[in-house]
Amino acid sequence: MKDYINEASAHVQLQEGIRVIEQLFLECYLRPGISTKELARKTLLPLPVAAAIKKELIRAGALQQERGVHCTPAGQAYIERERKYEGIDKRLYLRLMEKEFDWKSELAELLAMLQECFHGRPQVNVQIDQSKCTLETSLSRAVLCLRNHTLIGKKILCVGDDDLVSVSLGFLLKRLFPSASGPKGMIDVVDIDERFLSYISDIAERENLPITCHHADLREPLPEKLHGQYDCFFTDPPYTLQGMVLFLSRGISALKPGKGLPVFFSFAHKSPDFMLAMQREFIQMGLTVSETIPSFNEYEGAEMIGNRGQMFILKSTEHTRPDISGRFEDAIYTGEVRRTMRTYGCKQCGEPILVGIQGSYKTIEELKNKGCPRCSHATFDLKEKKSI
């Protein structure tokens, strides 16, 4: 079948990337008769740019202008078959896409169905910084994925999943496509904890969810078969700077090439200095912050972080790359970081610097904020680690 989106992209050079063409096309499918002005508003594009994309899709035979913009029969077939929208509950989809809409009332039955799955989760292992989010938070993340156009027909990776986000994503797809005969998305999970992988796999098999689990120690690179495959990823990493960089790097290695791919990144609320170090790392990895939602995540029994955490929606750019590509030797979990003395070398001048309770800097984020004492460079390699 003709690839209308890539054909239009070849004629309209967009800084926003190809995803926005798909989004505009979908708006025409889901809201037949939509105006060009409304298309521009929905896609956050300038009106002339939205009009140019519409014109190319009309020329390609995917859209037609008649009392608003509509899909042609060929365009509708493309969305349904190639983009996996055939059989969607449009009423539910449009309700869930409204940011002000209370989705919990619409998905009350689904929440009730998921109660047993979430109640039966394995106990957390605090040594690897596990902390279960609530059922409502897990499903909120799935709805957020939908609202960012990376659920239906997409490949999604969960980098660690003691929160069962994969299960929430799978059930939301089932709810949106009540009569689907095949998968409407693909969801993969990588985790070091075999208990959660087995638990998720059992649910997926029992409920016919499109989830595949992979055992992985993220200190090692992801298997090559997972590289460059995914439209987005979720991660809720250890709440250390090293853990954050490692989990984001592994997820980035799994993303497809392209601009504007979302990263759903959950993290604790932190001090201004820690947040500065975090944002330095985002820039280092070529990620932009699209949205920050305070207190989005709620956790069971996580008193140390006030039971709440924030959600960042990061976006890929043409400069996005993992900061860590090989094996990672540094401490990543909170308990490890507190018990070690680490020697880092400045990547610019090689200056050795002690970090830890007995060092010149207590944390790596403090060192990165202040820079190398010799040359002020802000990137470092771990040279040695000792337990205290």
Image (cartoon, helix red, strand yellow):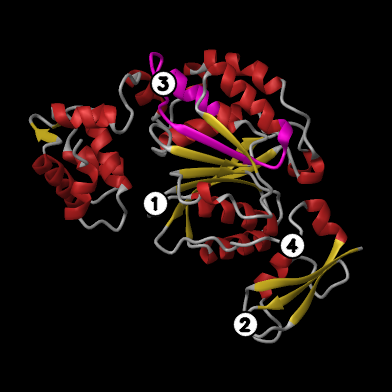
Q: Helix or strand or loop: what does disc 1 sit on?
A: loop
Residue corresponding to mark 1: 260
Are the two marked residues, 3 and 2, in contact with CB atoms closer than 8 angstroms?
no
Q: Label 1 neighbourhood size at 10 Å, few (<14), some (14-19), many (20+)?
A: many
The span shown in magenta is 168-195
Amino acid identity at mark 2: Gln
The image position of residue 248, as x and y in percent, is 58, 53
Q: Label 2 neighbourhood size at 10 Å, few (<14), some (14-19), many (20+)?
A: some
Residue corresponding to mark 2: 348
Residue corresponding to mark 3: 176
Which numbered disc flags the more N-terminal residue, 2 or 4?
4
Q: Label 4 neighbourhood size at 10 Å, few (<14), some (14-19), many (20+)?
A: many
Residue corresponding to mark 4: 330
Q: CA distance from mark 2 to mark 4?
A: 19 Å
Q: Label 3 neighbourhood size at 10 Å, few (<14), some (14-19), many (20+)?
A: some
User: Looking at the image, can residue 292 be seen?
Assistant: no
Q: Quadrant of residue 162?
A: top right
Write the residue at 55% across / 50% down.
251
User: Looking at the image, can residue 107 be seen?
Assistant: yes
The image position of residue 350, as x and y in percent, is 69, 83
Which numbered disc flags the more N-terminal residue, 3 or 1?
3
